[in-house]
Amino acid sequence: MAWAQSGLPDGGAFNRRDPPRISAHRIDPPAAVRRGDEADADGLVRELNQAIRANPRDTVALRRRAEAYLAKAETARALADYDLAIRIEPGNVELLLQRAKAARELQDFDAAMQDFNRALALDGKNPTAFYGRALLHLHRGDHDRAIRDFDAAINLKPDYAAAFSRRGVAYAAKGETRRALQDLDQAVSLDRGLAEAFQHRGQIHQGLGDLRRALADYDMAVRLDPGNAYFLYSRGLMRRALGDETQAQSDLARANDIEPGILP
């Protein structure tokens, strides 16, 4: 699996015992998913069904129902609602961006790219659109284009922590470790709650042989996202490398409970 999809370079200082890769194109879940409020999403869908029956051209209701479907992990239904809303308001940049994210989750990367491009044609100063398109370039392994779009996003929004984090991934994929670490340092300074930035930085420290710093970053990633099997697996392997087998076994068991089969 390539770094563009994962967050780590293949080969080099890394080997098959490295932590599993984390997705460079993962979509942040809607608020209801983060809170675990799927029941609330069910109720919202029922409410919005009535509103849409009363006014099928209500793009606000269509968008809200799409978001509720995403909260229920019903991405195809969400995409269908975005399609309807965009037919009604083809120049709505926010709808295009939301549909692009839904298409990306369904791994329809060509459709997602088309929507990000359309959004940028309508609003050439939209940092979210540049960031979304950069993630697609990163997934495809086109690191130079990804970096250019991350640059644009950061120029428009200098405190864009996620853009610094993912640009760091792109630089690492190109073997530019110093620039990668600079970006990841900046990401965590802007957002101490960005778990993926600590994970990425830990993986780079691990590749450089700085195992203590790697463990500190993995610790922070797990603290911020304790249910993430990949973060636990990374920390477990690092604890094992540092001789703490008891804690390593604990992390690895927890990781396997969350995602059965993660262990080799």
Image: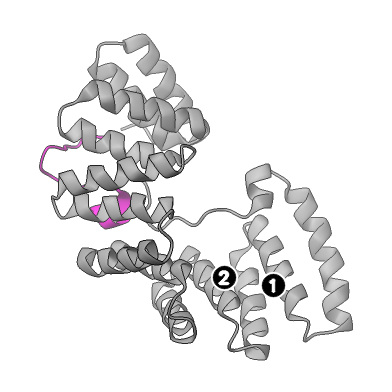
Residue underneath mark 1: 63
Quarter of the image containing the C terminus? top left
What residue is at 49 percent from the left and 38 percent from the top? 193
Badge 1 density bin: few <14, some 14–19, many ≥20, Cα 10 Å: many
Q: Spatial distance from mark 2 to mark 1, Cα to Cα?
A: 9 Å
From the viewer's perspective, is residue 101 above or below residue 29? Answer: below
Q: Position of residue 111 (x, y in %)?
A: 44, 79
Determine the main secondary structure of the stretch shown in magenta: loop
Look at the numbered discs 2 and 1 and tell me whether their residues touch, using CB distance below 8 Å: yes
In primary-sequence order, the first of circles 2 and 1 is 1
Residue 71, visible in the rendered structure: yes
Q: Secondary structure at mark 2?
A: helix
From the viewer's perspective, is residue 43 above or below residue 258? Answer: below
What residue is at 85 percent from the left and 84 percent from the top? 55
What residue is at 89 percent from the left and 82 percent from the top? 54
- In the image, the segment drawn in magenta is 1-19
What residue is at 25 percent from the left and 70 percent from the top? 145
Q: Amino acid at mark 1?
A: Arg
Q: Residue furthest left?
A: 12
The answer to if 9 sits in the magenta stretch is yes
Residue 10, visible in the rendered structure: no
From the viewer's perspective, is residue 4 above or below residue 252? Answer: below
Q: Is residue 125 left or right of residue 77?
A: left
Q: Amino acid at mark 2?
A: Gln
Q: Position of residue 115 (x, y in %)?
A: 47, 80
Q: Position of residue 69 (x, y in %)?
A: 68, 63
Residue underneath mark 2: 98
The answer to if 175 sits in the magenta stretch is no
Q: Secondary structure at mark 1?
A: helix
Q: How is the image coloured?
A: one colour
